[in-house]
């Protein structure tokens, strides 16, 4: 009898999942989303404007202290503390200290707000970011790969971080004259100190949204900010598998990965106009996972298929910000979950990916973001025996208006959520 209890108990389940929808409410819906592209500004007297078309202005950068070494001959006079240096399309920084090194200027800097550089003006654009305009691949904010000019080939890159191997494949696709679609595969593989093995995979297709932004500044203060993201489209498969070899809980910290797409020109009906302030749209990938793997006999798998379209908007007027996000289409079409364990030992494995995470960055500071997120999980519990699985999709957004000179608290919220869940007969 005792040997029977010790025998490995395998439980499996295949369930076409039933729906449990999340709240689709939003706060203070944004109404008018019309943007007229323009760049008309009046700079402050303390703003120093420089051009670096030949890439010879900035000689060195100490990123640890944000200290730049500039060619001193390019300045009419030495900058003073508190002044703002705008290198067109590349840099917006406030001066903290200045020293000389031969003919060069060594300038320690800090973050600058647009309202530090601009007294009055209106900046507006409407663009659709395209994969072939990406300039770099970043990993936890650090550039790990510089993209070739106007690349059209598949991006393939493997990064090891914290014992996890990340394999990234993004293949740009031309659709309706734009390279804003792609096929992708992300694979994370982990053996935790030799004690547990896990593999997480997300693959499918994505279409980036059109992105339009309006910034109005009056008398050195933000008057209005709008940012609209229309038409994120995603179709993907999520899957996970995990097997244990020692009792314990494992939470994997999986870092953020992003492709940076600079906006150097504002498209207008009469032709493109230069955008001097450094702006980029960063298309990010973020991962979350949690595992409880009791022993060598424990394992869990899950897979699901999802499809959606989504929008997300932000608007600041006066002293508050309004937000809105929604699904256009949301489909969770399939789910399959399996688990195995010795009697009495629980299992819980969860995996999620946020992609695309569309972040708007000005002068290296993230102003606002929207992402579509997808999560799946598989678990087994006892007393009574309960086997379950789930899949969820969300539209989430967030903002911090520091780069626009505002001190509104940083905030994020879930705009919309859909969830389907499968439960066995013993689940309560």
Image (cartoon, helix red, strand yellow):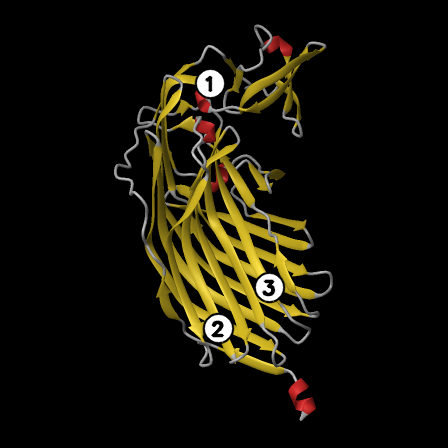
Q: In percent of the image, x 30 and y 27: which residue is there?
A: 269
Quadrant occupied by the N terminus:
bottom right
Local secondary structure at mark 1: helix
Left of 255 or right of it: where is 355? left
Quadrant occupied by the C terminus:
bottom left
Local secondary structure at mark 2: strand
Which of the two residues, 238 or 364, is positioned nearer the viewer here? 364
Which residue is label 2 attached to?
388
Up/down of 103 relative to 352, above or below: above
Which residue is label 1 attached to?
117
Left of 317 or right of it: where is 50? right
Left of 362 or right of it: where is 54? right
Local secondary structure at mark 3: strand
Q: Earlier in the sequence, mark 1 or mark 3?
A: 1
Report crowding for label 2: few under 14, some 14 to 19, many 20 or more residues within 10 A (C-alpha).
many
Q: How many labels does the image show?
A: 3
Task: Tell me residue 119's x, y (percent).
Answer: 40, 16
Task: Tell me residue 124's x, y (percent).
Answer: 36, 28
User: Residue 404, located in which quarter of the rendered image?
Assistant: top left
Instruction: Pick out the residue farthest to the top.
Output: 77
Which of the two residues, 327 or 426, is positioned nearer the viewer here? 426
Up/down of 247 relative to 251, above or below: below
User: Residue 226, located in which quarter of the rendered image?
Assistant: top left
Q: Which of marks 3 and 2 is nearer the N terminus?
A: 3
């Amino acid at each position: 009898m005792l040997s029977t209890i010790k025998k490995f108990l395998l439980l499996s389940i295949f369930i076409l999942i039933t729906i449990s929808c999340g709240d689709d409410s939003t706060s203070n819906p944004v109404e008018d989303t019309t943007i007229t592209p323009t760049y008309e500004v009046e700079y402050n007297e303390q703003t120093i404007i420089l051009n670096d078309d030949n890439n010879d202005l900035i000689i060195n950068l100490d990123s640890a202290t944000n200290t730049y070494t500039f060619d001193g001959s390019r300045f009419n006079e030495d900058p003073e503390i508190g002044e703002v240096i705008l290198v067109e399309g590349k840099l917006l920084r406030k001066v903290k200290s200045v020293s000389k090194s031969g003919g060069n200027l060594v300038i320690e800097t800090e973050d600058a707000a647009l309202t530090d550089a601009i007294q009055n003006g209106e900046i507006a654009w409407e663009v659709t970011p395209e994969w072939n305009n990406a300039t770099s691949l970043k990993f936890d904010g650090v550039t790990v790969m510089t993209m070739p000019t106007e690349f059209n080939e598949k991006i393939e890159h493997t990064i090891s971080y914290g014992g996890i191997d990340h394999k990234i494949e993004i293949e740009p696709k031309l659709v309706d004259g734009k390279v804003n679609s792609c096929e992708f595969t992300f694979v994370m593989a982990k053996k935790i100190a030799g004690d547990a093995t896990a593999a997480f995979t997300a693959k499918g297709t994505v279409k980036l949204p059109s992105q339009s932004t309006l910034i109005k500044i009056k008398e050195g203060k933000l008057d209005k900010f709008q940012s609209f993201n229309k038409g994120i489209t995603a179709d993907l498969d999520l899957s996970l598998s995990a097997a244990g070899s020692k009792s314990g809980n494992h939470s994997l910290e999986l870092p953020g990965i992003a492709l940076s797409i600079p906006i150097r020109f504002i498209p207008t009906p009469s032709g493109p106009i230069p955008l001097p302030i450094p702006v980029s749209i960063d298309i990010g990938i973020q991962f979350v996972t949690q595992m409880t793997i009791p022993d060598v006999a424990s394992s869990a798998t899950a897979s699901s298929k999802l499809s959606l379209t989504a929008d997300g908007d932000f608007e600041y007027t006066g002293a508050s910000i309004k937000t809105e996000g929604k699904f256009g289409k949301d489909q969770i079409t399939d789910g399959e979950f399996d688990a195995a364990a010795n009697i009495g030992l629980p299992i819980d494995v969860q995996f999620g990916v946020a992609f695309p995470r569309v972040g708007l960055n000005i002068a290296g500071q993230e102003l606002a973001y929207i992402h579509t997120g997808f999560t799946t999980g598989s678990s087994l519990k006892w007393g009574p025996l309960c086997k379950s699985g789930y899949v969820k999709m969300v539209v989430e957004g967030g903002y911090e208006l520091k780069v626009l000179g505002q001190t509104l608290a940083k905030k994020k919220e879930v705009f919309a959520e859909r969830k389907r869940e499968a439960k066995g007969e013993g689940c309560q």
